[in-house]
Amino acid sequence: MDDNSIIELYWQRDQTAVEHTSEKYGSYCGRIAMNILDDARDAEECVNDTWLRTWESIPPQRPDCLRAWLGRITRNLSLNRFAANRTTKRGSGQAVLALHELEDCVSGQESSDDERIVVQAIDEFVRKLRPRERQLFVLRYWQLEPVAGIAARCAMSVSNVTTVLYRLRKQLRTHLEQKGIDI
Amino acid sequence: MKSEKLLELIGKMDDGLVEEALCRPVTQRPWARWAVVAASAAAVVLLVLVAGRVFSPASPGVPITAVSGGDIAGISGTSETYQSLDQLLSHLSRHDNHSADSLSEGGSKGGLSGIDGSGCVEGSNAVVVNGHICHSGDEGIVISRPEGDGAAKVCTLEIFGARLFALGDRLAAVCQTDISSPDDPLDYQLNVHIYVYDLSRPEEPQLVMLTSQSGSYQGAFLSSGMLWILSSDGECACGYSRLEDKSGYIPTVTVDGQPVPLTDEQLHILGEPTMVRYLAVCGISLDGTVLEETQALYGDISNVFFGDGYLALETSTFDGRRVSQPDVYLFDIGGTISYKGKISTAAILDIPSAVNPSAESAQSFELVSFSTDEERYRMTGTLHTHSGDFGSTRIAAIEISRGLDCCSAALSETISGAVTITETVDEPNRQIICYSTFGDDFTMSGHFAFALYDDNLSVVTPAGNINHMDGIDMIFSYGSPYGQFSTIVPMGEVYLRFEGSPDRIQAYDLSDPLHPAPVGGVSLALEDIQRFCYLSHIYEDGRIGFIVLTPGLDEEGEYNYRQRYLTCEYVVCEYDPDTCRLSPISRFTVGGYQELAVVECGGRMYCVTDGADVPVLID
């Protein structure tokens, strides 16, 4: 079923909307959750919470890109769960590695920038990238795919992917600094 | 800002950007731009010459006749002279050129050059199948399962000298065998055997398929579930020794002992061969355990390049006096093989198609690497001009569109002396080219060059070349302690060049191709003793595994490098980019360094060598 039809079911408060969403995007959201949490039970809970949040949000929302919208919810829920697990010394997953990598881009100190400005700057940075670089950036730091999986998907070697991501992090840092963002 | 915050904010990116990136189609280069680039080439040359020694494309907008596309699989697409094997045999029976035998047996080039271009798996002596480690050694193929702090042997397959491939629960073992004639032990036929086992129950491996193909093993690779095996053989076809039966010139293929005859449609002649020598290409689906494809390619094949979805065969002919410039016959391989077209390097580089390499000012091109990215095929090599003892050389980079409808070439500045490209490292928009030169002073030195694949293909030899082989007598290659080539490994922006002893590891910042810079020496911080070390494994998290060979004291109290005195260790190191320091973090003694492999199984790292019965847990 196409995305517009699924969204329409939500607007009509037809509960089959959740079934169709789960059927079409269950694996996708599950993958994001597993990438972050590396625990099947936690991941399943986050995916189920995603369906609940979606049911509560549509209407009034009408997402333009349903997949990205759902992925973002799962991602946020999973990162919250990840943060909670870290305080109790549980869990692993790609989030640990991604956080370590992103330390290249920031100072590690608290900052007070308006989040909207930072997100705008990130959007601008990603928009300027070449398509392949954009894909690698999104797969690694939005979807938190493992580097080896990205390499296989994009038909590149692991070392090539690592190199490109390293350069992108350096470029992101420079871009944020040029935008006057307190990193 | 903390990294957690940045990670959170990345999640708030515009959904449209995310969606576009996740389902990104392949973006084709707008080839119409080449016309604009050619028109402004003069301005480009002037600008970049200020920064370094760069040359604009040697021949922008090369005529399309240099590349001939073909969508016909079969004899008619690959040779304009011969339409069948019979025609080739008939011609060679009267014109056989025995002086060409030296080329076919690995004279000037010879042998296989397998390039792991993208997503293509080459065989190993150790793989993991169904949670079990399978490694090929002196005992045959030993299947072990991880147990406690080590591994326990489960069973052994009496197959020796095999290259292993894994796909799902399937294990494929490829090995060379020879079958002697009962009447004459010196009359033997080389064959390649492929054993496919089902390891659903590793303690009872089930042989599900056994194929064989005649010829000497040239290589094998796994691509998209298909295992491709290459073998080569040939028989003289001259009037004196020509075989009576044509079948003697056709590879024999069997599946589970049953012959699989090749039809004429499966035989292809490449160009105008000077001898009858085939390259047999067989494709086995490991999922379905089916021999899906068999082809025999006849030509003066000097090099074979393969990658995910393609096979590129370099041909070069020697008629006793002149050598032809390389042609590359390109095939798409998926479930089947289909001929794509011929690439003529002579036409692309605008040089004579054949040359007497000893003649003054003769120009000859040597193809060194063939690879692809999503937009183009890349070829790299050296264009040598004969003069005096060593002549001069220019490094050449060639790019051809995936549709084989446009190509371009760029040459470096002229380099004096004999030039050998020792290694190429492919990156999305550039290629790092390591080369060595041997000059009039009889010393060897090493350098970097870069092929830059942006709007204007160019080859850069940096101003003030870094000589990265200062006075070094021996250097080592990846996976072997005996070699003459360096290995560079990208670690972010810094590339490490691994050489013989710990204090010779050099780090280079190659972020700016025009100004590569050494960033400091890197030491393994081992004791001050002359060790041999070579790169073994690169971990996803940036750690690096080395094999370190330490000499022991012999009976006379002298350090001795013979095998019985050597201690072999597997040393895992951490690289700190801020201090450019490579620090050992763990060391494991292993039995030997021959056929050493590192595999990951169940989240742990194991090392297999010829000196150990079972894998050793190292991490």
Image: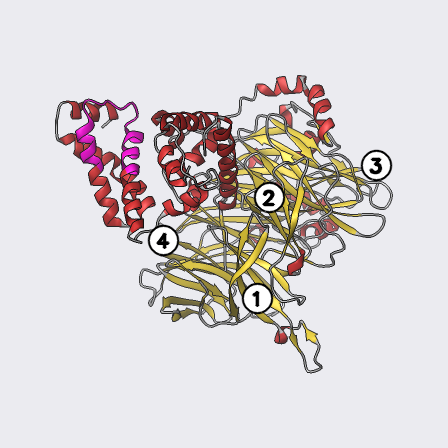
Callout 3 amino acid? Ser
The dominant secondary structure in magenta is helix
Which subunit holds the residue at mark 3?
A: B
Which subunit holds the residue at mark 2?
A: B
Is residue A53 one of those drawn in magenta? yes
Span of residues in magenta: A50-76
Marks 4,3: beta carbons within 8 A: no
Q: Which residue is mark 2?
A: B425
Closer to the eye: label 2 or 1? 2
**Residue appearing at x 59%, y 36% in the figure:** B430
If you read the primary sequence from the N terminus, does the residue marked by circle 4 or circle 2 appear first?
4
Secondary structure beneath label 1: loop
Closer to the eye: label 1 or 4? 1
Q: CA distance from mark 3 to mark 2?
A: 31 Å
Q: Are marks 1 and 3 on the same chain?
A: yes
Against B376, is A36 above or below?
Answer: below
Q: Nearer the viewer, residue A153 or B572?
A: B572
Q: Which residue is mark 3?
A: B361
Closer to the eye: label 3 or 2? 2
Q: Which residue is mark 4?
A: B168
Q: Position of residue A106 (x, y in %)?
A: 46, 38
Q: Which residue is mark 1?
A: B594
Secondary structure beneath label 4: loop
